[in-house]
Structure formats: structure tokens, C-alpha cells
Amino acid sequence: MTRLTSGAVLLRSRGNSDSGKVSFIELFFDLIFVFAVTQLSHSFLENFTWEGAIHLVLLTMAIWWVWIFTAWVINWLNPETFRVRSMLIGLMLIGLIMSTSIPEAFEGSGLYFASAYALFQVGRTAFTVWVLRNGQAELRINFIRILCWLSLSGIFWVAGGTVHEQARLVLWCIALFIEYIAPSMGFWLPKIGRTPTKVWNVEGSHMAERCGLFIIIALGESILVTGATFSSLEWDVLTLSSFATAFLSTVAMWWIYFDATAKTGHHFIAHSADPGRVARSAYTYTHLLLVSGIILSAVGDELLLAHPVGHLDTKTAAVMLAGPALYLLGNMLFMRIAAGVVSTPYLAGIGVFIVLFPFATSMSPLLLSIIVTVALIVVSLWGSVFTERLCQTKQHRDHR
């Protein structure tokens, strides 16, 4: 039997029935990000200002990026081996420190957050370079490029953690800019150039399932927020109506992604001649919009349950509409990249939310939420029909 410590076994197998399966250690690892998403939404509720919104955007981008980079790594490494499992458990510890630091990231815990984040990114990538030391040369060089880019951004993360809030914001924005632009540039470095997407020979079904599971994490946060807030309130007609509306909107968001978008993505990435390009654009970037939309929707649900009637201020209205709109925008961009089409249901839903905004402050939170929920339900049903027809057309063309 091949030893578990051999380089071959440390890499995920390709092309068999088990290659796309998500392992239990990956699900265990994701628990850290359940906590992180909860911290993000609660932190924004405690600092419900435009400044708090900026902090939420930056921290959400960071949390998503550290997770999706790990998903890419585990698409190549075999999580059933002792060394890879040990690496993931070590990352969980670092991630717990990072997640715990989120509420005070722009105050006293900035250095803890930044150091944990940088160590997470750099340490995981360095481990991957070590695993690939006797493996495929192009893939190893790719991760050396990634390590250089993340080491550069890590300097700005740690430096930002040592200064005050405004300077910290600037330095962390620079760090995120470096990290977000790097994949689109193929992690270009002087002399050794860039990595072509053909090298990113991802296991499409595994990537699709991993990203779907993160959407479940984010939607689970909506359920947790709704349930926890509802349990602490007096149960009357208004509270029950708000609870039902919040729940149905979460169900509609689940339906939109898993009954339409995810099916399309799985089908097209599995049949793509360049799955690395599809995974980079469709999963790595656009899913950030989906996650951000779900987090904002969870915040909107809690605000709805706390005050279902009465005056609706501009900030609350913006959150209640921006969350679903961002979510639909992410789904629409995903469909455009993966399948080459503009989804009419998603575009129509975004249009409805844009039209609603000027009139939102004249409504009660409950009325606005009901309208948003009905719109999401219509989009989910319409989207399912649209996707079914799209996949049937694609299959018909493939058989011709």
C-alpha cells in the first residue's frame, strides 16, 4: 500500500467517482466560517452606520477570500491524508482567532485580526508549495507566485493592524486590492511570468459543491438570526408576520441559487474546456456578491423583526433592498460567466428593487419586506423555468 505521506497520495485524485466529494474534515473546517459570518452580521448591527457598512464590506471580502483560497487548495490536496488534515485543523485555530477579532478589528483587535489573516493565507500557501515540491512543476510554480503575492499583501495587513483606524482602513484596502487583482493577472511575477488558467485544472464538481456549501453557511446565518430574534420577542400578529416573511425570503434565496444557478454552474464547469477560467471568474469573484447579499439580508431580517411597523429610515431601507439586489446581481453575473447568458428573471428582480428604493421610506418595514419576499419568490420560480430551458438547449446542441 502507498504510504499516506507520499506526494502522490497528498494530492486529490482526478477523474473518478470520489474525486468531487467533499470530505468531513472540510465540513468541520467550515464551522469556523459559520462563526465568522455570524460575527460579520452582528458587528454591523452594533455599528449600524455608513462607516460600519464600509467595515462590513472590507471584512466580508477578507473572510470570503481566505475561505475561497483554501477551497482552491483543497481542490488539489487530498484532505483524507494526515498532513492535509493537520494543516486544516491548524488553520481552524488561526481562523478562530481571526473570527473572534472581527467585532474589534478596527479598534483594539486589529493586529490580532491582521496577523491571523496573513498567517492563514501565507501559511496555507507555503504548505502547498512544500507538498508540491516533487509534483507538477507548473502547479508548484503557480503556488510560488501566489505565495509571493500573499506575502506582499500580508505586509500591508500587519502594518494596518499597528496603526489607527483611518490609516488602517487605507492599508487594508491596499492589501485587499493586491489579493483581489492577483488572480485576474495570473499571479504575474517578473521573469517567471503569469500562470495560464489551463494550469488550474480544478475538479469542477468539488469546486461547485464547496461554494454551494458556503452559501448554505451564509443562509444558515439568516435562519439563526431570524430564530434567535423571534424567540426573544412577544408573539403577536406583527411578529409572526415578520417571522414568516423573513423565513420565506430565505427559502426563496435558497431556491434561486440551488434550483437554478448552482445547477447551471455545475453543468457548464463540468463540460468546460477551461474549467480553471470558469472557476476563477464564476466562483471566486461572483460568489462574494452572493455572500454579501445574504449577510445584508440577515441584518435586514433582524431589523424587521425588531421594528415591523413605524418609520423606515433610509439606512434600513437600503439594507433591506441592497441585500436581495446584491444576491441577484451575483447570481446574474455567475450565469453570464458560466453559461454566457443574461438571466432575465434576475435582471427583472434587480430592476424591481431599484424602482422600490425611492418609495421605500414611505412604507413600513413589514410592507417593504413582504414586497421584497414576493419578488424573490417570483424570481425563484421564473428562474427555475429559465434554467431548465437553458440546460435543455445546451444538451440539445451537445447531441447535434
Image: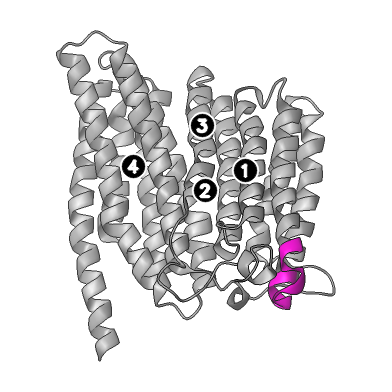
Left or right: 168, with 65 as reference point:
right
Disc 3 designates what residue?
35
Between marks 2 and 1, how big is the CA–CA gap?
8 Å
Between marks 1 and 4, how big is the CA–CA gap?
43 Å
Q: Position of residue 280 (x, y in %)?
A: 54, 64
Instruction: Give, as a single range, the part of the protein colored magenta.
Output: 130-140
Residue that lies at the very extreme toward the front in this rendered image: 1
Image coloring type: one colour
Disc 1 designates what residue?
89
Compare residues 42 and 77 and report the one nearer the observer.
77
Kind of residue at badge 1: Ile
Disc 4 designates what residue?
354
Is 133 magenta? The answer is yes
Kind of residue at badge 4: Ile
Disc 2 designates what residue?
25
Between marks 2 and 3, how big is the CA–CA gap?
17 Å
Q: Secondary structure at mark 4?
A: helix
Kind of residue at badge 2: Ile
Q: Secondary structure at mark 3?
A: helix
